[in-house]
Every structure is written in C-alpha cells, then in structure tokens.
Amino acid sequence: MASKPRTRSSTGSTSKRRQAQPHTQTQTQSPKQKQQSAASKSKKPPAKSKSGNGERKSQPRNRSLERNRVAASKCRQKKKEWLSDLEANKIKLEKQYKSLHGEYKELLDEIRNLRTF
C-alpha cells in the first residue's frame, strides 16, 4: 500500500501548541535577583559514586594525602630550623657590628687626639 502524504491544516500544528500554553507576563528582574536566581540554578549536590568500589578509589588518594602530610611536616620542620639558624646568625652579626662600631669610634677618637698635637 502506498502511503498518503500528510497534509497540515491551515492553522498548522505549531500554532495549536502555542495556544495550549498559558500566557505569562514577563517580569523584569533586578540585577541582584538575576544573580540570586543564577546562583540557585548553578548549585548542584555533590556527585555520588555510582560504583560500589569507592573504597578502592579512595586508597590511592589517602596514600597521596598521607605522603603530602609527611612532606608538609618535614618542610615545616626544615623551615623552623632555617629560621633558628638565621636568628642565631643575626645575633652573632649584631654582636660583631657592636664590637666593630665600638672599635671604629675608638679609632676616630685616636685620630682626633693625634691631630690636636
């Protein structure tokens, strides 16, 4: 059997669909309201693992996190040692500066005394 070509009514099927939808008035939103509505649309709940092997996937992550904790602790310890060495060096240099500055003043006084003769 040969199929007949379908014919559209004069109003068309799309116009009927448009008429079936209720007409709503468009309201203008303030920028703040637009931001709030956009923010509420973008918030999604955290994705859940569909597979039951969540524990196996978290093991490498846990190992990585533990290595990172150890490395961070080691780094903090090295920084403390470096700072204490720096502080000790500062104290030593301050003492040396005071000693040299005192010697400098003594030498200046000696030069003045020699010029007055």
Image: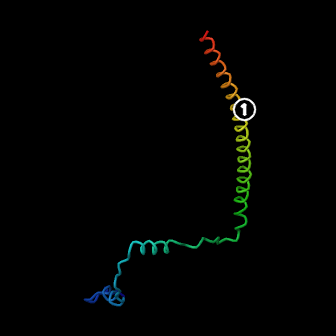
Q: Where is residue 99 in the image (x, y as percent from the top left)?
A: 70, 26
Determine the residue positioned at 71% across, 48% down: 76
In which quadrant of the rendered view does residue 13 lie?
bottom left
Local packing at callout 1 (Cα closer than 10 Å; few below 14, some 14-19, many 20+) is few
Determine the residue positioned at 65% across, 18% down: 107
Q: Where is residue 70 in the image (x, y as percent from the top left)?
A: 74, 51
Q: In this view, does 41 lie to the left or right of 87?
A: left
Q: Which of 10 and 24 is in front in this view?
A: 24
Q: Is residue 115 left or right of residue 64?
A: left
Q: Where is residue 78 in the image (x, y as percent from the top left)?
A: 73, 43
From this view, report whether residue 102 is shown above or below residue 35: above
Q: Is residue 29 left or right of residue 36?
A: left
Q: Give the colour scheme shown.
A: rainbow
Determine the residue positioned at 70% across, 68% down: 54
Q: Position of residue 88 (x, y in %)?
A: 73, 36
Q: Which residue lies furthest to the front in this view?
A: 117
Determine the residue positioned at 70% across, 71% down: 52
Q: Which of 53 and 41 is in front in this view?
A: 41
Q: Which of 1 and 102 is in front in this view?
A: 102
In which quadrant of the rendered view does residue 32 lie?
bottom left
From this view, report whether residue 11 is shown above or below residue 80: below
Q: Which amino acid does label 1 sit on?
A: Lys
Quadrant of the image for the N terminus?
A: bottom left
Q: Which of 22 and 79 is in front in this view?
A: 79
Q: Is mark 1 on a helix, strand or loop?
A: helix
Q: Residue under label 1, please give it.
A: 92
